Image (spheres, rainbow, N blue to C red):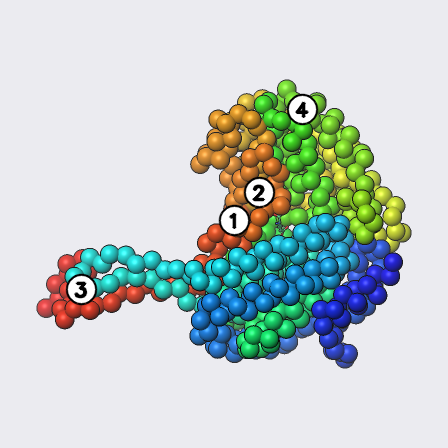
């Protein structure tokens, strides 16, 4: 199959009009074959500043459009995504190497967040509180915050942007999107669909301005005070570079960084369920989700059985071309991702770990990097296990007491997603309690990945503390004003203060 041709067809369905550029370009690639596709325009720092100018101009109009009218645009956008679901899934499949079902799932996640945001556009509610003063009213109002800088990663090139953008738009913000250089085609297609929806709805242009570039190009997003919120998804290293710069100008941050997600498997666990949940979370998306499962902490009484069942499944997972039906594990994004995986496995063995299954390169295309998901038993939670390696490696640790399991679980720097497999209600509740899992996402009897958009998504510690997507994450995209209104003809002061 000619993936360059297929990408061009999807782009033209989405009415992406790529200008012939004399300026900087980035080469679109596919990890499916490891080949280059074609060059597309890229942006430098000057273009990013121009993007902020344009998005800020649009903000000045957009913030006064009634929120339900803003919702109507997001509704149309959701319809266009639905109409182009196959095209977007093609691009995600080509640029990220996701299997069809997961590529379609990513696009469905976009439709879901649009639905959510449309409803939200009539529910951006502030509270009214009783005032302590007679003839006074105390209330809060939520206002648009400004330009939102969205920095997204290769692994969810469309959905993570849409979580931010659907909310930002109904909240009255506009967006400058710094997309991953690894997935420019998907970002051009998403932006074209949104621009089309905006045009049809009579919304101002430049509600979302796409920039494709490297970290240096993104610098104005971090430093420009008009960018009220920076929502960045990616590695802990990226977050450590971004956060202090935004904080230095007191900009608001929504960070969604590394995960080192684990499942605890207790003596009472339903192992049929556990094996399925663990395999999807660990091997799905070739271990390249921020929610991918990286650790299993299993009770010593079930360890042999669980490991042998997991190994049997890892050994027979279909690793291969994601466009071939039946494939479950597609490629790693790059040669360097494969090298990191290999390095991690060597360190694991040097640290006394035992490779039980997988880890080897699978020969699918000579220039592409496919790997069989690796299952590694570790004698301890070593420095390596405490790090996020963005590849399909699952470390197995054992425990004897529940307290030990929770302590091991929480003894990593990251705090994104977690799960427990148990049929003991006490254990489940203890894991969910204040002294249980310290993560932002805590699941029972499902794996760590595949969160629904209705909940707030994000995590603690080095994961960065941000929340995106559902629940009340919208508040991160608005500014709150507290209003005290005096409708009396007296001027009583709060706290009973007397002044003259
Ligand atoms: C990510 O990997 O950055 O919960 C996002 C999940 C998906 C989103 C992952 N809904 O796995």
Q: Are marks 4 and 2 in contact (CB under 8 Å)?
A: no
What crowding class fits label 1: few (fewer than 14 Cα within 10 Å), some (14-19), or many (20 or more)? Answer: some
Q: Which residue is mark 2?
A: 417
**Taking 441 as reference, is 208 above or below it?**
below
Residue found at x 24% / y 56%? 130
Q: Residue at x 72, y 41 (%)?
A: 283
Front-lying residue, 11 or 265: 11
Q: CA distance from mark 1 to mark 3?
A: 39 Å
Task: Categorize mark 2 by other alpha carbons within 10 Å: few (<14), some (14-19), many (20+).
Answer: many
- The label number, if any, that marks residue 303 in the structure image: 4
Q: Residue at x 61, y 24 (%)?
A: 299
Q: Is mark 2 within 8 Å of ligand 1?
A: yes
Checking the image for residue 490, the label placed there is none
Name the N-terminal-most of marks 1 and 3: 3
Q: Residue at x 51, y 53 (%)?
A: 470
Q: Which residue is mark 1?
A: 455
Residue positioned most to the left: 500
**Where residue 42 sits in the image (x, y, percent)?**
71, 71
Label 1 – label 4 distance at C-alpha = 32 Å
Sequence order check, earlier mark of 1 and 4: 4
Q: How far across and how far down the image is residue 15, in percent?
A: 72, 72
Label 2: element kind: strand
Task: Please tell me whether mark 3 sits on a helix, a strand or a loop.
Answer: loop
Residue bearing the label numbered 3: 135
CA gap, disc 3 and disc 4: 67 Å
């Amino acid at each position: 199959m000619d993936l360059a041709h297929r990408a061009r067809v999807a782009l033209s369905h989405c009415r992406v009009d790529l200008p012939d550029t004399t300026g900087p370009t980035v080469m679109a690639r596919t990890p499916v074959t490891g080949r280059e596709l074609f060059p597309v325009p890229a942006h430098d720092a000057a273009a990013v500043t121009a993007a902020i100018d344009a998005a800020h101009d649009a903000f000045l109009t957009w913030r006064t459009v009634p929120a339900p009218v803003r919702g109507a645009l997001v509704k149309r956008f959701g319809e266009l995504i639905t109409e182009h679901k196959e095209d977007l899934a093609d691009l995600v499949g080509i640029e990220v190497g996701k299997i069809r079902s997961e590529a379609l799932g990513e696009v469905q996640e976009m439709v879901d967040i649009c639905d959510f945001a449309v409803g939200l556009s009539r529910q951006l509610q502030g509270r009214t509180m009783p005032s302590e003063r007679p003839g006074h009213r105390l209330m809060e109002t939520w206002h648009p915050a400004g330009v939102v800088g969205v920095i997204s990663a290769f692994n969810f090139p469309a959905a993570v942007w849409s979580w931010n953008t659907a909310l930002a738009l109904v909240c009255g913000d506009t967006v400058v999107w710094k997309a991953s250089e690894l997935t420019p085609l998907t970002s051009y297609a998403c932006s074209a669909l949104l621009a089309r929806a905006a045009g049809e709805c009579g919304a101002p242009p430049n509600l979302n301005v796409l920039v494709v570039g490297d970290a240096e190009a993104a610098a104005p997003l971090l430093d420009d005070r008009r960018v009220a919120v920076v929502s960045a998804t990616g590695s802990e290293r990226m977050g450590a570079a971004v956060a202090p710069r935004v904080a230095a100008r007191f900009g608001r941050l929504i960070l969604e960084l590394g995960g080192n997600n684990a499942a605890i498997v207790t003596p009472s666990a339903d192992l049929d369920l556990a094996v399925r949940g663990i395999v999807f979370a660990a091997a799905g998306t070739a271990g390249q989700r921020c929610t991918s499962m990286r650790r299993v902490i299993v009770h010593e009484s079930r360890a042999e059985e669980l490991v042998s069942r997991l190994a049997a499944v890892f050994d027979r997972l279909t690793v291969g071309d994601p466009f071939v039906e039946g494939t479950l594990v597609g490629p790693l994004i790059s040669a360097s991702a494969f090298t990191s995986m290999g390095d991690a496995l060597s360190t694991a063995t040097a640290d006394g770990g035992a490779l039980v299954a997988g880890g080897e390169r699978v020969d699918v295309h000579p220039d592409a990097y496919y790997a069989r998901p690796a299952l590694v038993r570790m004698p301890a939670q070593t420095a390596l296990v405490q790090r996020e390696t963005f590849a399909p490696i699952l470390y197995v640790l054992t425990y004897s007491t529940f307290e030990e399991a929770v302590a091991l679980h929480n003894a990593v720097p990251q705090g994104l997603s977690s799960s427990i497999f148990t049929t003991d209600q006490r254990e489940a509740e203890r894991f969910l309690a204040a002294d249980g899992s310290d993560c932002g996402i805590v699941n029972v009897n499902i794996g760590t990945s595949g969160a629904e958009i209705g909940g707030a998504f994000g995590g603690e510690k080095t994961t960065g503390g941000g929340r995106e997507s559902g629940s009340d994450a919208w508040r991160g995209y608005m500014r709150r004003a507290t209003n005290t209104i005096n409708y009396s003809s007296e001027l009583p002061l709060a706290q009973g203060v007397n002044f003259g």
